[in-house]
Image (cartoon, rainbow, N blue to C red):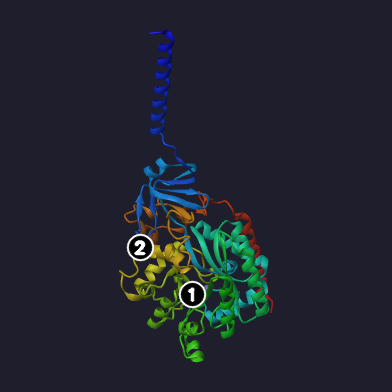
Amino acid sequence: MPKKFLSLLLLIFVICAFCVATRHVQAATPQKERVDLLISGGTVVTMDSGKRVIEGGAVAVRADVIVAVGARQEIESRYEAARTIDAHGKIVLPGLINSHAHAAMSLFRGLADDLSLDDWLRKYIFPAEARNVTEDFAAWGTKLSLLEMLRGGITTYADMYYFEDAVARVTKEAGMRGVLGETIIDFPAPDNKTLDQAYNYTQKFIDHWKGDPLIIAAVAPHSIYTCSEKTLEDSAALARKNGAPILIHIAEAPFELEQSRAKHGLTPVAYLGRIGVLGPDVLGAHCIAVNSADIATLAHFGVGCSHNPSSNMKTAAGVMPVIEMLAAGVPVGLATDGAASNNNQDLFEEMDLAAKLQKISRMDPRALPAAQVVEMATIGGARALHLEKRIGSLEAGKQADLIIVDTSAPHAAPMYNVNSELVFALKATDVRTVVIAGRVIMDERKALTLNEDEILQKAREYQKQIVASLAQK
Ligand SMILES: [Zn+2]
């Protein structure tokens, strides 16, 4: 055999061996998909339609979206992340949704308590608002609430207040998600002295935030007892012209029911239905004074409702019939209300109280079990705000809003049942890490987008100013 031919054979053999070897290596280490963030290990509470809880789970996030949720080994074998957060021994769940707040009112926290709603409003809150609420007040008061909400695992909140454009600006700066409603009310407000001014402001506000990934501008006619029929109709028309949600207090206390019956011959829910305000774009806060026909009406129109147990107990407003509403198919979320009537923005506390309030008011310990309460604080709140396609659960394709909660404190050990743990044992201070739209906003309890020292300093300054303003006659 010629030498040349032998060399050629050897060369072909070497090339083939190389090809086989490289193919083998490629098969052994398949290319992993790149993602930005992996949360790995821990108990993953998905709140998906099957209510899957994955022990030793993981969540993969690319940009602002969840790309996969599953067992840790499976997710880690498929994805390679720029950053991995170890969640072993912790609970990973969707960010909490606070479906009703007046964030800026945090600066009135503890200003006046233990009063009738009427005295509280007329002697303290309305005068304090008239003398102090400016755009600067709204911005700093909101920042104080955002800091508190963030540290307690709230990633989305619904707000009703004044200067809502400033509220939106600081919410966006903090990287948090908000459904923010400019209040429309039949008396001169701190920002708009007439209804025409209020409608103009609200239109500009909606235009300003159109298409924003975090901020949804809403229209917030205050209530049926502070807005005329025309105001309610015009506010709803403005919202619907723009495709904006409507936030409104509905049946929040017995006095509202009495007034509505006397004035309109109807319950508040029936009245709002008759004048065309109710619809699948409405979130009603409180919904306490409702009968079974009202509940059917709310379900019929697809209205979402917000339950505020602390505030309802503190103002002795009554108890929302949560169980009947859920049974009728009304989406019910959980909320803190403003810090002036709560006095905090802690949804862990609201979860605990929501369950206990139904139990004691019915003398039935089986009422409103923990799993249902966790649902109200997450996907239920998303449904109430009509955002369940975007947020509220950990599922591929949804926005990456999630929190990591520590379970190592004495009050949390041992953990038999994750829902029981979340509702009855854990506290807002157990939240370690918060991710909103894929961005880590709080890292190991450090707020990354809000300056805590500066905010607390401003709160103290405003306290002095508010006390001085109320001393003036
Ligand atoms: Zn309210």
Q: Which residue is mark 2?
A: 371
Furthest toward the top, the residue is 2
How crowded pointer 1 is (Cα within 10 Å; few <14, some 14-19, many 20+) is rated as many
For the N terminus, which image quadrant? top left
In-image side of 20 versus 227 (left or right): left
Residue 158 rendering spot, x and y as whole percentages: 53, 67
**Distance of label 1 from label 2 (alpha carbons):** 23 Å
In-image side of 135 versus 53 (left or right): right
- Amino acid tagged 2: Ala
- Amino acid tagged 1: Gly
Q: How many marks?
A: 2
Q: Say what secondary structure mark 1 lies in.
A: strand
Q: Earlier in the sequence, mark 1 or mark 2?
A: 1
**Residues marked 1 and 2 touching at CB (< 8 Å):** no
Q: Is residue 463 visible?
A: no
Q: Which residue is mark 1?
A: 284
**Residue at the spot x=42%, y=8% of the render?**
3
Q: Say what secondary structure mark 2 lies in.
A: helix
How crowded pointer 2 is (Cα within 10 Å; few <14, some 14-19, many 20+) is rated as some
In this view, the residue in front, 428 or 63, is: 63
Q: Is residue 262 above or below residue 133?
A: below
Any mark on residue 225, and which? none
**Residue at the spot x=47%, y=60% of the render?**
391
Q: Is mark 1 within 8 Å of ligand 1?
A: no
Residue 104 rendering spot, x and y as whole percentages: 59, 67
Residue 119 rendering spot, x and y as whole percentages: 55, 81
**Residue at the spot x=40%, y=23% of the render?**
16
For the C terminus, which image quadrant? bottom right
Q: Is residue 153 above or below residue 295?
A: above
In this view, the residue in front, 185 or 427, is: 185
